[in-house]
Amino acid sequence: MTEPTRASSTRRRDGWSWTDLLLGRPLTSAQASHEQVGVLAGVALLGLDALSSAAYGPEAALTVLRPLGGGGVGVLLPITLSIVGLLVVVATSYRQTIAAYPRGGGAYTVARENLGRPVGLLAASALLLDYLLNVAVGISAGVGAITSAFPALRPHTLGLALGLLGLLTLVNLRGAREAGALFLLPTALFIGSLVALLAMGTFRAVAAGGAPVPVVAPPALPPVSSGLGVWLILRAFASGCTAMTGVEAVSNAVPVFRAPSVRRARVTLSLIILVLVVLLVGVAVLCRLYGVGATVPEGPGYQSVLSQLLAAVTGRGVFYYVAMTSILGVLALSANTSFAGFPRVCWLLAMDRYLPVAFVHRGRRLAYSRGILLLAVLAGALIVASGAVTDRLIPLFAIGALLAFTLSQAGMVVYWTRHPSEGWRWRRALNGLGATLTGVALAIVCVAKFTHGGWAAVVLIPLGVLLFSRVHAAYLRMRRQTGLSRPLRLDTRESLVAVVPVSRWSHASETALRFALGLCQDVRAVHVCTDDDDVVPGTLSREWARFVEEPAVRARLHAPRLEELPSPYRGLVQPLLDYVDTLLAEDDHRTVAVVLPELLERQWYRAVMYGRRAELLRSTLLLSGARRVVVISVPWYLRSDLETRGHAPLEPGAPSAPH
Amino acid sequence: MTEPTRASSTRRRDGWSWTDLLLGRPLTSAQASHEQVGVLAGVALLGLDALSSAAYGPEAALTVLRPLGGGGVGVLLPITLSIVGLLVVVATSYRQTIAAYPRGGGAYTVARENLGRPVGLLAASALLLDYLLNVAVGISAGVGAITSAFPALRPHTLGLALGLLGLLTLVNLRGAREAGALFLLPTALFIGSLVALLAMGTFRAVAAGGAPVPVVAPPALPPVSSGLGVWLILRAFASGCTAMTGVEAVSNAVPVFRAPSVRRARVTLSLIILVLVVLLVGVAVLCRLYGVGATVPEGPGYQSVLSQLLAAVTGRGVFYYVAMTSILGVLALSANTSFAGFPRVCWLLAMDRYLPVAFVHRGRRLAYSRGILLLAVLAGALIVASGAVTDRLIPLFAIGALLAFTLSQAGMVVYWTRHPSEGWRWRRALNGLGATLTGVALAIVCVAKFTHGGWAAVVLIPLGVLLFSRVHAAYLRMRRQTGLSRPLRLDTRESLVAVVPVSRWSHASETALRFALGLCQDVRAVHVCTDDDDVVPGTLSREWARFVEEPAVRARLHAPRLEELPSPYRGLVQPLLDYVDTLLAEDDHRTVAVVLPELLERQWYRAVMYGRRAELLRSTLLLSGARRVVVISVPWYLRSDLETRGHAPLEPGAPSAPH
């Protein structure tokens, strides 16, 4: 009887299936090391968000500086240097966090342990918002860049964005290692071509004595329309700060690295920051040397800063197109960092029961599947709602990231105070500096962007904290109520009544009835008279007397009576519910066991055809309110056509009665 | 314990709810007469499909006749007269069907009883296709007419069409009487304004001695581009035959009328046909007198025939707009006839088990809710798929209707031969004439429209028959396999093992365990070690020894052992399934009772939060293949916060054990 099931349960592991092909073979928990990565894959897996900043950070700052005309290009370098300074401080303090929290020290963990749970939840909420927006913004920006390169694709913007989201989801469901390996090539291409650009640009500038002639001249810079002011500088700095997002990803995901994981994580973070600093400073220097500024976004002659720079240094040859392709690819893939971070934060929250326990579960490839799927669904909704045009989301995004940074580093200050180890003073000073700088940047971004959508972050982040608290309260209530620390009680012998709904005398109803008769003395068969009965009225009661009551009396059993329940509104459920309630009201110490004959087929899709009535009855009985009931499903399986021809005996398929 | 449930079950009848407000109070089966209608409501409920033909039948014929130029208008009258003749013959023979089948004599019933079941199913399939297409075409045409009158609405075509479909669905779910009452006013307005048009047009023509001058001259007729040929006449006839659809609706729905229902149904049918004949002939005469022909559909200066006629007779005053509005309204509502017919055919098929038994069930207002919903879903899908442009569906539509007519009347010929009563010879002759004429019309439409989509009907109608046969075969198989005509067997005493999945020692697991201990001697508690356990390993087995085994030994019971099941793939279901299969393989005469502790809340929406694991286990156990298992759900209800504050005792909520 069990052969078909056996076969299907083992096939899942030995053969292959479409699910295996799509998502990869399942991995056992013991194979966890299989999914850990090294430094290079770690850069590809966790670094794309930070590295892609090199493509849009300078552009964001230069756009704010446009009113300065040619002077703006000059101001870019000091602004970039201050951002780079902030970046180095933040990264150094995250290197310390990695050492202090080798199990993954995201903003949530650090803030919770050092500043208290409410602050931890605030950091978690900010970080989740940041990760979510990074996916929506990253994919939309990437697809936007691709469609401006290939205008023929523009009508398919939404489809491309959702397709890319689906691809990232699928790759991440297949596990960290595959995602890292897959993104290694585009990452290498991106870094390689930008470093080549910087080298060639610098060489040509030096060769030309500091005043190189662009191969393709960039568009003329606009005339000066405003003087240099503090507010303008601050706004440019705030815009450039979007380059900071993604720096925390490595510290959040230390366990993803192969042993020694702390060391690998620190090397990975340093490598990412080093490359990013080189790219940011290099771009700022070359922009000044070649006179490249920002063109009007959405304007007719729009060209990204990197595109202008590439054309100015190398002309529009093969290299230009290879480099542009790698930039577009990395922009589009920068969302992947969130797929590494978001599910881990969900996992941490679920471990502490601030999110449902389902987020703890690792999927077939040991990835936190539910977190990945939640991120994909939320980001997909955001992309569809915004039509893949996400400019308005960018301010929220920087606010979430900077808030998480500030809280995490403030937490580290407390950490060093509590755990004074070698060199703790200068470490604390460094973290304090980081917290202060990111706090100031946060204040600037909040003020500069509040009316441009920043207010939404001020609403959404506390809403997240509220959600976590509600989930936690529900979980605590459940724990408190169900918790039991006394031995099993065996003295409560109460009365049991079995109710068997019967529509006609059949194998299914016989099997259920037999089980009920073994269960207790008091068995009531009930027949609800709905309008879809197809038997002549009275047939069932005649059959009952002949087929059930007579043999039961002969066997000296209490004969189960058949009760006909009228159903004025033709429903099956309500009369039965009322009957159960009547039985319960008769005796305070009674439990009603509803024994449901379920007619099923082995193929689940066929079972749907017959199984719905029992399903409806069961869920209504259980969910319509607290009753002293037990619902017993007694299945009876239809044979397939093949078996029918073989005339297999029917009886062995039916469950037996308790004794 | 049962109070909240009681309250909720009685509220459904005594108070009010949103569902009541939307769908009307539930009616008991005894209140069936409440939903029956009289003649006038019957015309509105069942006649709109036929009556709206007056708006598009002449137009369809005139469009085919365009190549004849001015001569086409002259040919319209003889063609109309032959269609009217066919209509009268068909209607007369349906009057006889009504008398012969007072429980509703649709094409399915008549063909099945007189020509055999396969022919009956063919008629049913044709009729269902006709009804379905009538909804899609009627709504699309109505909305099309409305948007050409108000071009500002054009971008909302699909929304309007689906909204109208939703409205018709809702009204019909509220029951036949409300639908009839609601559509009475538009029907009356439509008939009234067209009769007024005919009266004024005739009066003005007579006053002008047979050559009236149009108030607004209709567009000039096109030059003659083709001679009068038999094929052209036949094609015009075939197009005009779309006016025939909807004639069978009354005969299908006799029980919807108040007693004496046969007489009321016959009067209703006669009234509908009388009005339709007057309108068709009147329009054909006036078209000739005022020189109105068809303009190019979809052309720039397109104007419907009735619009031209109204403008020619009365000018574009208030009357023109009132009449046009009523025409558009009736076109849009003509789909309603299908909502009366389709669910009744489904009901008949389900009574004979050619469709799932669910279609037999009458909803809260005694309407066949599932048939109505199925029609709405299918028509909605058609409307969305075609973007509410349904020209291509029209040929299919006439083929379905004419096939059903032909089969139904051929069936009546057999009926009169078998049941010779007073005047049976001329009745038979009349039905024979009807069958021949509709058969010829069917042949013409098939040939003329085969390449224009008619072929799809030739595919779809047999597919419907195939579907009915498969459902019937599945039903027969189910009946044959489950059918039992021997007494209850009580001698099969086989062994029972209870398996209780436990994640931690709690009230819920105690309750389930207590029930299992009462059920049989051999109870196995199993703990599947997944990765979302939040307890320290070993905690459960220590608690088990202390809280379960000790008291059980003291009570001299067989102590239930706790087995830890490893789960290498971290899943909950597969290890349990494998364990159950192992237990079953050990002993051929064993049944496994899986006792599931279910943690539930009284509010069903909260129950969703906790109930999913047990739900998943149960459905996998039952549906993954035939096993000798019984699944027992032992609920344990969490109290709401309110009750928690009141410190209500916990124990009474738990079900008791069997004895």
Image: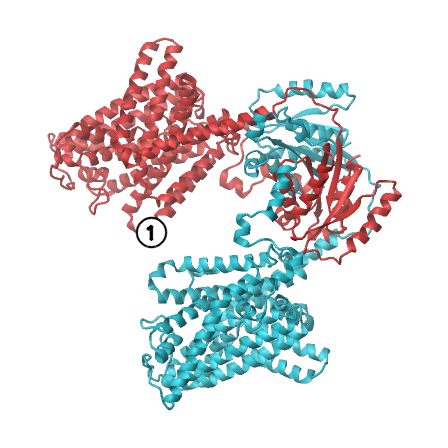
Chain colours: A cyan, B red
Q: Chain of mark 1?
A: B
- The answer to whether A513 appears left or right of A343 in the picture is right
- The total number of labels drawn is 1
User: Residue A83: where, in percent of width, then height?
Assistant: 51, 81
Amino acid at pointer 1: Pro
- Choose top left, top right, bottom left or bottom right for residue B142: top left
Give the vertical position of A318 relative to A527 (above or below): below
SS under mark 1: helix
Q: Which image quarter holds the N terminus of chain B?
A: top right
- The answer to whether B228 appears left or right of B84 in the picture is left
| Label 1 CA crowd tier, 10 Å (few <14, some 14–19, many 20+) | few
User: Residue A145: where, in percent of width, then height?
Assistant: 40, 67
Q: Which residue is mark 1?
A: B155
Give the vertical position of A538 relative to A568 (above or below): above
Q: Which image quarter holds the C terminus of chain B?
A: top right
Residue for point 63% across, 40% down: A5
